[in-house]
Amino acid sequence: MGTGNMGKYTIKDIADMAGVSPATVSRVLSDTPGVNPKKRMEIKQLIKDTGYHPSSVARSLVKGRTNVVGVVVRDLENPYYASMAVGFQKELAKIGYIPLVISVEAGEAKGTGRNYLSEINRLFDFAGLFVSVQTRENILEESIKECQCPVVLLNRTFDIMCDQVIQNDYQAGVIAAEYLSGLGHRNIMILQGLVRESPSCRFRMEGFQQTLSVSGIELEAENMIESPLDMNAAYEVSMNRLKNRELPVPTAAFVSGNSMALGFLKACGDLGIRVPEEISVVTIDNPPIMSLPGINLTTISVSMDTMVSEAVKVFQDRVEDKNKKHRFVVLKPELIVRGSACPLSEAGE
């Protein structure tokens, strides 16, 4: 093969020459399974012969559609979503896609009066959408139906016809309850997101509460507190509970969101309540900030790398075959022990 067009080939050119879809070429480029070994060798030889490099796909991946992928998150100020955005940037670059990260809260703040997911779908010709937002199911379902591209829903459990990749939130609640009760704690509180608005928060609460109940521990009503998934809001409700002198300070707390956990820690600090000496704290999700000195939170989480990598694989499968059955991938969370919790017998030492 001549080299006169060296460097001018696109991924679609390689796919056409190999008689496969662009998604199959992407799999070969990223060493992803699912390609016939003989065809994989053929594609690699074509890549070598043409001098093709993934960076040359900026023009397009599929005829009539750009290679820009939307990553729609709730709030980029939340460390969890910021970490997710970085993860997608790395993973999508491996297969020649460019992410456009959009914060739903920022869009809604403009007061358009329209559903933001539908709005961005009209504004951009996305090759795909990764969506991790908190919104009513009917709004989300309507938005997804309007999309003409593959949609992968992340860490949100809805009865919607699209691919979904989630953390087992019920299991996360179970792990938190087993860990804190195993440390001897009985006077335990839960600071949770708005259960009526978030299935994830509801599942975490149910797993936590039911597991404690099996151990003979019943959560007191005053120790079941809800807050928006926001540091400042969590700080306010935490202050109101912890400074109430008519109620004993719990010896342990399960805070079911990382931004809320930061607000809870700030409240403890302002009230002079030492962590973990006076109150043990366990939270959900594990963005890098959780391991910093002065925070050092014990967390229960699926690693962001795993979550994002799995979502990208599901997306590739959908690009490969738009008619295949929608996938519902459930990832098991793991306990990451740091310094924010200790046995009740060691409290106060």
Image (cartoon, helix red, strand yellow):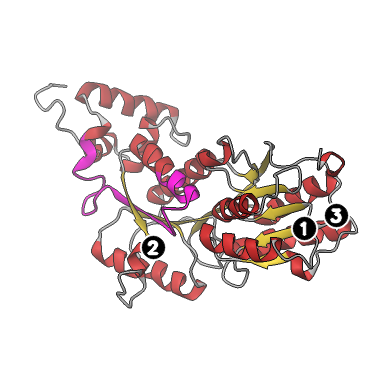
Which amino acid type corresponds to the residue marked 3 in the rendered image?
Arg
Which amino acid type corresponds to the residue marked 1 in the rendered image?
Val
Query: Could you tell which of marks 1 and 3 lies nearer the N-terminus?
Result: 3
Query: Could you tell which of marks 3 and 2 lies nearer the N-terminus?
Result: 2
Is 232 within the magenta? no
Query: Residue at point 79% right, 65% down?
Result: 247
Q: Position of residue 323 (x, y in %)?
A: 43, 58
The residue stretch that appears in magenta: 56-85
Label 1: few (<14), some or many (≥20) within 10 Å? Answer: some
Is 63 within the magenta? yes
Label 2: few (<14), some or many (≥20) within 10 Å? Answer: many
Q: Which residue is mark 3?
A: 186
User: Regarding mark 2 in the picture, which secondary structure is present there?
Assistant: helix
For this view, does 60 lie left or right of residue 267? left
Of the numbered discs in the image, which one, if any, rests on residue 342? none
Q: Position of residue 332 (x, y in %)?
A: 65, 45
Of the numbered discs in the image, which one, if any, rests on residue 249? 1
Query: Could you tell which of marks 2 and 1 lies nearer the N-terminus?
Result: 2
Of the numbered discs in the image, which one, if any, rests on residue 104? 2
Q: Which-is-in-front pick, marks 1 and 3?
A: 1
Image vertical order of residue 36 relative to residue 256, above or below = above
Choose between 268 and 199: the one closer to the eye: 268
Choose between 106 and 262: the one closer to the eye: 262
Which amino acid type corresponds to the residue marked 2 in the rendered image?
Val
Choose between 321 and 100: the one closer to the eye: 100
Label 1–label 3 contact, CB within 8 A: no
